[in-house]
Structure formats: structure tokens, C-alpha cells
Image: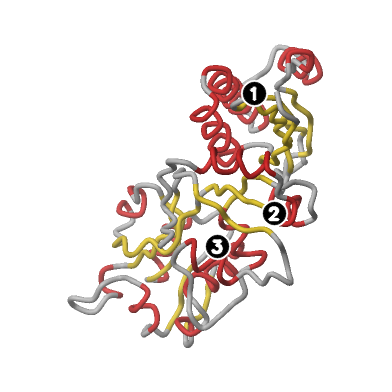
């Protein structure tokens, strides 16, 4: 083996699974087994944390059973969940893989993108949403693809760039009641640019929606938010127009909503800190990005 490359990955959830599946596609059977093991373990532990499963053993016994440091991992750790009462939750900590002769150490981070920004890693995986929220400045024009995102990143602010998306696509989609749309109008960015009135979004996505649509399109638009305990599609139906994350849009249709343009995919992305690149990290990054069916267009 030639050296060790450390790669930052999320500690849990869809982005971690997407990153592990990408390694499985590149590194073969051992990586596939790791991806399956981590996904099943963390889904079970999530169910325990949320009270949908009852564990027979204590959390430290489970940690000991799950972890295999002598065999290269995976290893897990405990963090406080953000649910009421802040219960402890088992999350991914680390593992090692052989990728085409390179010893790769996967390191769990709560926010891998920020770890790359502080030059802890040359490579990592995180949500495209976080990149838009953190380093893409607001502009009258919105962003539509990977080229737009990287072009907007100020090199004086960060050396991190997006290499590719991984295709694990959940989309920020425009939704509206049919009567909100004039006859024959398309529910797209152009419609929003000419619209004046309330637009329902989750408050945590306000900065992202502004970056994606552009501040020019939002002149005359007032952001409103779902009340606590109200389903977001229901709140959009009451408002008349909104943006929500969806895979199929099935529940939106149940509320009588028309699905419009997919504004930007909430996709896990491969990130690179260009200032930390070596021959080994460059080769690994190229291997991980090869042949990916990304939803983030990169014209």
C-alpha cells in the first residue's frame, strides 16, 4: 500500500450512506460489506433513539459489539441527539479501506465541509445544501448547477470546491395550489420572479432558497414558515406557494399541490480542498468521481 489518505465523511444519515456506497462502487466487496454493516447498524440505533426499537443491551455493550478497531473498523461513538432531552445516539466514527492500493481512513465528522475548510482534510463528503448555505454569496441571479456553485465560491474565503454529486437525490421543489398559477403558467423560476406574495419554506432553508433562486427573483416575496407541528406540505397548501424537499412528490399531491421545477438537488457531494491536494488524494478523488450519475449538472 502507498500511504494513508484520510477522508471526512458524515457521522450518520443519507449523506454517510451515499459516501459509503461510492466507496463500495470503487473498492469492491470489503467496502460493500462495510456500507451494509454501517447502514444497518445506524438505522437500528436511530430507531432505538426515537423509541421505535428497544435494545436488550446497554449502549456501551452495543458499542463494543459493533466496533472492530483491530480489523480496521468500523468504529462508532456516542453523541447527543438534537431531539428533546438530548438522548445519546450511536454514530459512525471511523473505518479503513484499501482502495486500489491506497490505505483510506474514513473519519466521521459532524460537518465534514467545515473540516475541509479548516484544512483538516483534502477530501470529504457532505450535503450540497451546506455548501450553498456557507460559502455561496447571495446574488441577484440564482444558481442552477455545479459550475455556478464553484464559480461563486470566493477563493479568498475557502480552498474547497465541489467535485461531483453522488446521485442520492432529494430535490428542493417548487409546489403550489393550482389556483395560484395563472392559466397556462409554468411553476418555475420565471414564475417566482414575477410573483409577489407569501412563499412558504422551512426557516432552516431560507439562506439556501435565496442563494438558489437569486435575490432578484425574490423581490416582492415574503417568506412564511410552517407553524410548529404542521406538516410542511399542508402549510404550503394553505399559503398557496412554497419550496419543499421531496423525492417523489407523492405527499404533496395528497395536499392538492402542483409540483413545479426542481430548483436544486439536495445531493451528497464529493469535496476537495485544493490547497491540501497530493498525488494520492488527487488519484483517490478522480477514482471516487468517475462515472457518477450526478443530478447537479456540470456543463
The quarter of the picture where residue 234 lies is bottom left
Residue holding disc 1: 98
Relative horizontal placement of residue 134, taking residue 70 as reference (left or right): left
Residue in the picture at 52% in, 69% down: 209
| Mark 3 residue element | loop
Establish if 153 lies above or below 82.
below
Residue in the picture at 68% in, 39% down: 280
Residue 136 location in percent, x, y?
A: 61, 69
Residue in the picture at 54% in, 66% down: 149
Q: CA distance from mark 2 to mark 3?
A: 30 Å
Mark 1 and mark 2 in contact? Answer it, CB < 8 Å.
Answer: no
Q: CA distance from mark 3 to mark 1?
A: 41 Å
The answer to which of 22 and 277 lies nearer the viewer is 277
Mark 2 and mark 3 in contact? Answer it, CB < 8 Å.
Answer: no
| Mark 1 residue element | strand
Residue 191 location in percent, x, y?
A: 33, 78
Residue holding disc 2: 273
Residue holding disc 3: 202
Query: Which numbered disc flags the more N-terminal residue, 3 or 1?
Result: 1
Query: Which numbered disc flags the more N-terminal residue, 1 or 2?
Result: 1
Establish if 223 lies above or below 128.
below
Establish if 190 lies above or below 93.
below
Q: CA distance from mark 1 to mark 2?
A: 22 Å
The quarter of the picture where residue 261 lies is bottom left
Q: If the image is split into quadrants, where does the C terminus sit?
A: bottom left
| Mark 2 residue element | strand
Query: Which numbered disc flags the more N-terminal residue, 2 or 3?
Result: 3
Residue 70 location in percent, x, y?
A: 79, 13
Query: For the view shown, which residue lies furthest in the bottom direction?
Result: 220
Residue in the picture at 45% in, 63% down: 145
Amino acid at each position: 500500500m502507498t500511504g494513508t489518505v484520510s477522508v471526512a465523511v458524515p457521522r450518520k444519515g443519507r449523506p454517510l450512506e451515499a459516501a459509503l456506497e461510492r466507496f463500495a462502487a470503487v473498492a469492491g466487496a470489503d467496502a460493500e460489506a462495510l456500507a451494509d454493516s454501517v447502514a444497518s447498524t445506524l438505522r437500528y440505533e436511530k430507531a432505538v433513539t426515537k423509541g421505535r426499537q428497544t435494545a436488550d443491551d446497554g449502549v456501551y455493550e452495543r458499542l463494543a459489539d459493533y466496533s472492530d478497531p483491530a480489523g480496521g473498523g468500523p468504529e462508532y461513538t456516542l453523541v447527543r441527539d438534537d431531539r428533546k432531552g438530548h438522548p445519546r445516539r450511536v454514530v459512525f466514527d471511523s473505518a479503513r479501506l484499501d482502495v486500489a492500493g491506497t490505505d483510506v481512513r474514513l473519519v466521521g465528522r459532524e460537518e465534514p465541509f467545515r473540516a475541509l475548510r479548516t484544512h483538516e482534510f483534502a477530501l470529504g463528503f457532505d450535503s450540497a445544501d451546506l455548501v450553498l448555505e456557507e460559502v455561496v454569496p447571495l446574488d441577484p441571479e440564482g444558481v442552477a448547477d455545479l459550475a455556478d456553485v464553484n464559480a461563486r465560491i470566493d477563493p479568498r474565503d475557502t480552498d474547497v470546491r465541489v467535485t461531483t454529486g453522488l446521485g442520492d437525490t432529494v430535490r428542493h421543489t417548487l409546489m403550489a395550489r393550482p389556483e395560484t398559477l395563472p392559466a397556462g403558467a409554468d411553476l418555475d423560476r420565471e414564475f417566482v420572479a414575477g410573483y409577489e406574495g407569501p412563499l412558504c419554506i422551512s426557516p432552516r432553508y431560507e439562506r439556501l432558497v435565496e442563494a438558489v433562486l437569486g435575490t432578484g427573483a425574490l423581490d416582492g416575496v415574503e417568506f412564511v414558515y410552517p407553524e410548529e407541528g404542521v406538516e410542511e406540505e399542508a402549510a404550503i397548501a394553505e399559503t398557496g406557494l412554497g419550496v419543499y424537499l421531496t423525492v417523489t412528490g407523492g405527499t404533496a399531491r395528497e395536499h392538492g399541490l402542483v409540483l413545479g421545477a426542481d430548483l436544486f438537488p439536495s445531493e451528497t457531494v464529493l469535496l476537495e480542498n485544493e490547497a491540501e491536494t497530493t498525488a494520492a488524494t488527487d488519484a483517490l478523488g478522480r477514482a471516487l468521481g468517475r462515472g457518477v450519475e450526478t443530478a447537479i449538472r456540470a456543463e
